[in-house]
Amino acid sequence: MDKLRVLIQSNSSRAVTGFGKAMKNLLLAFYDDPNIELIEAANGARYGADLKTPWESHGTYPNNPAILTQIQGDPEKERAAGYGFYTIDEIVEKVKPDVFLGVEDIWAFKEYTTKTWWGKIPCILWTTLDSVPILPLAEQMAPQCDKFFVWASFAEKAMKELGVKNVKTIHGPVNYENFYPLDTSSKSQLKEKHGLSEDFVIGFVFKNQLRKSAPNLLEGFKRFLEANPNSKAKLLLHSDWSDKQIGWDLPKYVKEKGIDPNLVLTTYLCKSCKEYEIKPYVGEDKPCKCCGAENSMVTKTTAFGVSEKQLNEIYNVMDVYCHPFTSGGQELPIQEAKATGLITLVTDYSCGTDAVGGDTGGLPLHWSEYREPYTDFIKATTDPDSICEQLTEIFNKPDLEKQELSKQSIKYVQDEYSVQSIVVQLKKELLEFKKTDFDFDRTRKPYNLDFVPDVNLSDPDWLISLYNGMCFQKRDESSNEIKHGLTLIAENNRKDVYNFIRNKAAQRNAETQQKSKSIEDFLGEEDVKERIIVVIPESAGDVLIVNGLLSNLQKLYSDKKIYVMTQPKFFDMINDHKDLAGLIPYQKNWESLLFLEGRGDHNGYCEIAFLPHILTQRALGYLHNNADKNVYNLLENI
Amino acid sequence: MHLAEVYAKDLGVKVGTPQFTPHFFPCTFESYITIHNGNKVPSKEYSYWRDVIRIIKPELQSRGIKICQIGTPEESQIHGVDARFNTGTLKQAGFLIQGSLLHVGIDSVPVHLASSLDIPSVSIYAHTYMGTCSPLWNKNSKAITLESHRDGNKPSFSLTENPKTIDLIKPEQVASAIFEQLNIVPSEIQKTLFIGDKYNHQCVDVILNEPVPVLLPENSVIRMDLIHNEKYLKDLLSRQNERVLIKTIKPINKETLNLYRDKIAGIVYFTNSFNPKFVEEVKLFGIQMTLVCSDINELKKQRIKFIDYEVNHFDEKAFIESKKKEIKQKIKGDVQYNTDKFYLVGNKKILNLAEVKKICGLKYTDDDFFIDSDHMMIYITNKL
């Protein structure tokens, strides 16, 4: 039986990122699946590179010199290239998948709905949304997908409140093989090894960044110490303490709050022997008492950290896990901590809502709302009193109750986050689709301007039918376009709305006709070496001036054909010239000397390209107070 | 259009000659040529100056002409020159150029200084069009410019290239241009037939057929795949200062790895079925490991098993066949070759693998020549 071919696009499975690890876990899990074949489209890897994976994989960063020339220096195009925008069409055409599954931040798929294959094969997006209000892009894209998965249930709830119907929570798959509770004897030995036998250890594992509320935790810890002076509590912050540029200056906050620095611990790792030690922070580059190496003990960084086996030991040294944060996609350490049997205290916002209450083995940390500047997202600042209260609650809880919560934690992550359970859920969703019969023809079909919906339909159904029949776009009542369209119908009438949508469709057909052509469609049969292209994007007067230069240009290059690239609205300023071989409609991404003339193994489209507007329209390099002179007397024939 | 013309057009004037006054720099040589190889733009840096010197030096030496490299201390030393002058300023470089018979170099300021001082020059170009930046101002002297054929491609205009198109200019082309400028008719001339893409890479492969009595340079390769002798390995590592690479087809004792992990730069493990315990141990000791599988039928299986590693594929037989095909079509008759790779057996330095195998009692064939061909420059020398 032919397997269902699913093209999954995300961070490369070799990337050490949340998405990368999820991708690897899924690809491994599906490798021997009898019904589904996953093919990897790896963001961050170059198109055409050998990714050395056991499964079929394709890098998505472009390798075409013409495209690279176009994107160079344009941050938005560079970002789109990083998300595979420029190569995904080729990959889809090559792979011919039955289903497309995109697993990235939502903005990675901006404009994907304009792809010729979108909607022709089932398209699923599986994205992390970490705050409310929900990103408008997510709200807009969800109805255009066959299925829309989110990593946290609060996002599903928020989107359903907006009227989006096809959204579902599927958590990111995490491999817990290396995270489990050690036996009592091993835990005791570990604690003893690090001098923590008598201590109540509160732990937080995090990348030191501003959305991890370390200062709040320090304040909460301080209050806990004051409320419980005999607790022998210590706070273990397993993080990078050295990079104060992007994160918190932890030593400074410890000092500021008047906390005894011997009560705030971190994990040191030896660069030489890779052994680790848990102890108070005393700076970086310290000697290793294990191998004797000088200046080798450091706190972790993104590039250098403990192994998973060591991290499991570190979790097992803790008595409770506390994770205050402003918002997050999934927050992997929470699930790792749960897998080791720790009771988790987590801010009850964003993905944290999935980690507390019920049978999760977690207790909530209360928070207050604040608005993030520029984005206006709601973020959480965790209440230190709540931290203190919940730590006290756990500290005083009888052992039997703690054991019960611990068991719940372990079961909860196995049921909800393990690779096995996620794969079961995902497989069920994917097998709703059948093998495709789409021919993967990339020619963009023009909108059907003659389509008229059935007049007997209700307003919503009439609009949905119009979008589907004229523009071949799936919409439902939750779509912004339908909601907006209903408002317009109420204020005006169906005829006006029909004409408006039809005019937009006609405009789009005209643009598509132009855009879908390559530059070669506007050039003649002559050899590249026999061509000159003069680029003068605007305006009418400039084009007229260039018109006046064409005769002399043709005399100088009698063996060449001369083309002019300008905006179509200025064609009339030059199309009467007898020496003009052709007109090329101006496109910004064609405005590059190296794209037009060629470089390396890219042959280009002409021998000579002139871009005289660079010094006049792109940079003002010709004014000179009109006081400059010229030996050439270029106006002598006027 | 030449860059000077672009600026002239913008200023509305015609191109003229620069006025430039060199500053004194001490040099006692009466007759010399200057040579320059900058590294500000990696694409321009020519890899075969050493071979140019090797070709021209006998003729220049017999005529009492010295070869002097000019430039800054950061620029790589050209092997074989008679003197190296770290010219602090361009005006000092200009002084040396002005006193020379000829300037030879990459497309850089010294070439233009030579032109403005009317000194003959030989300069080489690749990543941009020669015509846009060639020397302009020679009046009584000549500037010879050599441009790479780039295999028919256009210039890349890129600051870095891999492989560099400037290296397509053969050393004898540069040498011939130098002889032409100095009115020298050489007694023989080299014709390069093949240059491997690892030529100029210094490489020492060590065979543990007997103890190694010397200290090895950094990144020497211990060929445990040829002779697996852990006793000699341990002895070698115990004395080494610089880190070495190890190529092996079998696991190595973990005590040795642990004890000498700081002296091991990396392990290349060649096999069709990797030993997981060995792989894990190497990782635990923080040693860089490269896994290479030669059997295409085993590759997927090994890649799944060792998913956290990039398992490479290398088919030695196919590699040899492709090299044989590439080289044999260029070679007819006896040839010479230079290489920067050699094998060390005890304290004996041996240039080719076949001889190494013979000494060590291993099976060898003519194909062994092609295994190291990427490290070679193969040429013939014709008497004139």
Image (spheres, coloured by chain):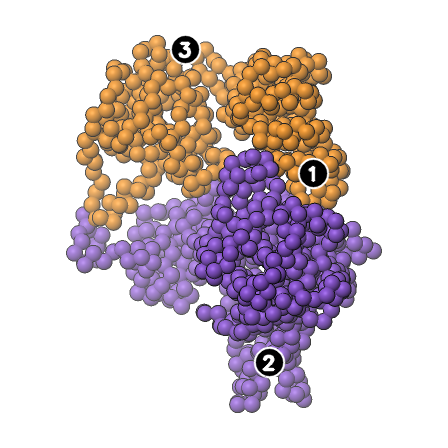
Chain colours: A purple, B orange
* Quadrant of the rendering where the C terminus of chain A is positioned: bottom left
Between the C-alphas of marks 1 and 2, the distance is: 58 Å
Between the C-alphas of marks 3 and 1, the distance is: 60 Å
| Image height of A62 relative to A120, above or below | above
Tell me if I can see residue A297 in this picture: yes
| Image height of B384 relative to B48, above or below | above
x%, y% of residue B224?
67, 24
Q: Return the residue at label 3.
A: B187
Image position of A14 (left or right of B125) = right
x%, y% of residue A593?
41, 50
Between the C-alphas of marks 3 and 2, the distance is: 87 Å
Element at label 3? loop
Looking at the image, is mark 1 or mark 2 nearer the viewer?
Answer: 1
Q: Residue at x 72, y 58 (%)?
A: A341
Q: Residue at x 20, y 28 (%)?
A: B23
For badge 2, the amino acid type reads Ile
Give yes or no for contact between labels 3 and 2 (Cβ–Cβ under 8 Å).
no
Q: Return the residue at label 2.
A: A482
For mark 3, does the 10 Å Cα neighbourhood hold few (<14), some (14 to 19), or many (20 or more) residues? few
Q: Return the residue at label 1.
A: B280
